[in-house]
Image (spheres, grey):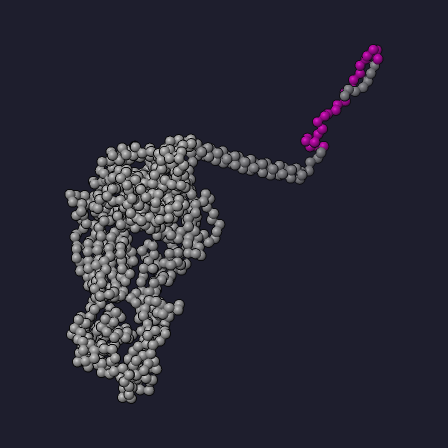
Amino acid sequence: AEGLNLCTSGSATSCEECLLIHPKCAWCSKEEFGSTKSITSRCDFLQNLIANGCAGAIENPSSSISVVKNVPLSSKGSGQTHLDVTQITPQKVALNLRPGDQTSFRVQVRQVEDYPVDLYYLMDLSLSMNDDLDNIRNLGTKLAEEMRKLTSNFRLGFGSFVDKNISPFSYTAPRYQNNPCIGYKLFPSCVPSFGFRHLLSLTDKVDRFNEEVQKQKVSRNRDAPEGGFDAILQAAVCKEKIGWRKEASHLLVFTTDDVPHIALDGKLGGLVQPHDGQCHLNEANEYSASSQLDYPSLALLGEKLAENNIHLIFAVTKSHYVLYKNFTALIPGTTVEILHKDSKNIIELIVKAYNSIRSKVELTVWDSPEDIGLTFTATCQDGLSYPGLRKCGDLKIGDTVSFEVAVEARSCPAEDTSHTFTIKPAGFRDTLEVVVTYNCLCGCTSHAAPASGKCSGNGTYTCGLCECDAGYLGARCECEEGASGDMHQAMCREAEGKPLCSGRGECSCNQCLCYESEFGNIYGPFCECDDFSCARYKGVLCSGHGECHCGECKCHAGYIGDNCNCSTETDGCVSSDGQMCSGRGTCVCGKCQCTEPGAFGETCEKCPTCPGVCSTKRDCIECKLFNSGRLADNQTCQKHCKDEIITTVDVLETDDPNAILCAYPVNNCVMKFTYLELASGKSNLTVLKEPACSSAPSTMTIVLAVIGSVVLIGIILLGLWKLLVTIHDRREFDRFQSERSRARYEMASNPLYRKPISTHNVEFTFNKLNKSYNGTVD
């Protein structure tokens, strides 16, 4: 092998130690082999041992796998024998692991058609749910009709809850014992408060569901939060009373219009004992430990739901949607849907949630040993492999997906130790049992010979070496401790001129006895090695991901580099969309180095200047605000959009130069939003509350607009005509004046300048009163 030989530099003093150094290391058990000065030469790569003449005496075990049970996948769920339905294959495998030697097997999962369904309807019967109760009185019949379109084997059950009947959660004064609604004018009569009441075991007789619902009346508690988590836990763990079938898909529909009480809230009522996760239904099918145990924690709920293969569906009002959506990230296998205030959409909600559950497969691991490493690679319907993923979505009923599971043992436990863990799809009853045994012993160890003559009668001969008894030293146990002499000292020098035992030990019987050190172990034929003089990273020897051997870090599987700080794992580089570094960078030492200009983030998922970013942000807006779009699945949305901070506004401000404006069409309208990448790595999205829509103009508006346009054009044309005529007249008048000024007429002869009044003198004579006159008449 080229470069550093991990096997020979590992200072192995036995066959078992050699096998632990690296899965490619082998041990030569041949008696006459290698140098008398060194025992590490027996531990080497297989090809080197063969080349050095050790063929036929090599210990090199490897990991193996055997399939114990492998029933083929079923194609249909409902039939005469539901227990024969198989949705995962194989069902049991046995692994024999050598530490560091990874082995893998393939798991196939199929959501079979017509699989039986058990649905338990758990309803909040607090006072605010009164109108909801009226609307579900015939729910059983309608729901059965819809669900039987999806499965021919459907059963329905019913339970209700309010809250713990202790103060301060409920009204406990004597006057409220029989009717906590006394004095409440809007609703003066209701039943006493209760924690959880199982009303109808799972049955295919849906009329009984309707009858039981019609009997129910609401109650009243004091504070706003409800005791729903108590009810969920009892419905999950009381399998016999609820009637969950092993061969059916289990759905638990939880309907409420308020927030739940969680663990430690019970201390307000003096309840300090944590919930024990057990069934506490009495003969009347009521939760009997309501006033003794605290509310369950989210972790306990998730554990019990998973143990009993129950899919929890939160059906909650819009005002509490975000809270319960956050719960789904903490309780695996849960979904959340928005419930109308009067529960009119409950059937549509349940069918939608069921289809969402059946469209995905996610593997979970139970009881995995700490010294076992598991790596998953999913192959979904698109035929592509997704390293690090154990989930496939967008599936149709009957689709088959596969997962490559790689298993590696990190250490060797005590002899004859075995471990068993389980792989199961979330919400399925089908499981894959994996039994692990450890291949840590060499075969030659079983042929050990105590007090062997090969060891001078002072030790045990095993695997080609002597293990000396106490007080004896030497390759053949030929020396007693304390023996010394010049003849042996030459055997304690690594080379001529070098100090005895590298100055870190004493020479005894041609062997070096190394000093003890407060920093670690000193070892080697010449005490030339130690386990503390290696490169460190942030003060940690070999970064905590390797072992120091003779000045060199021997990295654990999955790490490389001088100080083992470089991870070869790529899981941390896989972005939420399954791409390596979001397609904008390369994975170096388990971390993304972004190569696309403008890209940043742990997986280069942030890139304001990259094309297609608006589309990615749109997916998060649709799933977070409207529970729609490509990422509508709750857990997928939570995973993909965990760094998106979304704010809705009435008017979108676009004056920020760092904000990017995006828009996309929605039902003949346009939804606009801006996004800004924050220094914390999160994105701030500002979205319009409603899409911007432009209404079409009316016919009258168009007619009036046309008429107005024609009139306006006419007035403009008339104005232009008047302007032109006026200009023309002024020009003509000016010309006339000019010509007149140039004319030279005789004033006397020009008829234009004659006076309009003419004077004529007439001479006459007349007699008047015998008088004679002469004169003129004007």
* Residue 543, visible in the rendered structure: yes
Q: Which residues are magenta?
A: 748-771
Q: Quadrant of residue 123?
A: top left
Q: If the image is split into quadrants, where does the C terminus sit?
A: top right
In the picture, measured across the screen, residue 323 lies left or right of residue 281, that is: right
Q: Which residue is situated farthest in the front direction here? A: 174
Position of residue 742 measured from the top left corner of the image (x, y, whole percent) = 66, 39
Q: Is residue 528 left or right of residue 467?
A: right
Count of marks placed on residues? 0
Q: Residue at x 33, y 67 (%)?
A: 545
Residue 124 seen in the current view: no
* Above-or-below relation of 333 to 757: below
Residue furthest toward the bottom? 486
512 versus 254 height, above or below = below
- Residue occupying the point 65% across, 37% down: 737
Report if residue 672 lies within the magenta region. no
What is the quadrant of residue 13 in the picture?
bottom left
Depth check: give the residue in front, 736 or 144. 144
Q: Residue at x 36, y 58 (%)?
A: 603
Q: Position of residue 410 (x, y in %)?
A: 27, 65
In this view of the protein, which residue sits in the foreground, 108 or 369? 369
Looking at the image, which residue is at 26% across and 44% down?
A: 238
- Quarter assignment of residue 356: top left
Residue 666 drawn at (x, y percent) = 37, 43
- In the image, residue 621 sits, relative to residue 475, either above or below, namely above
Quarter of the image with the N terminus in it: bottom left
Q: Residue furthest right?
A: 771
User: In the rendering, at what x and y percent does residue 403 appear?
Assistant: 24, 56
> Against 173, is 326 above or below?
below
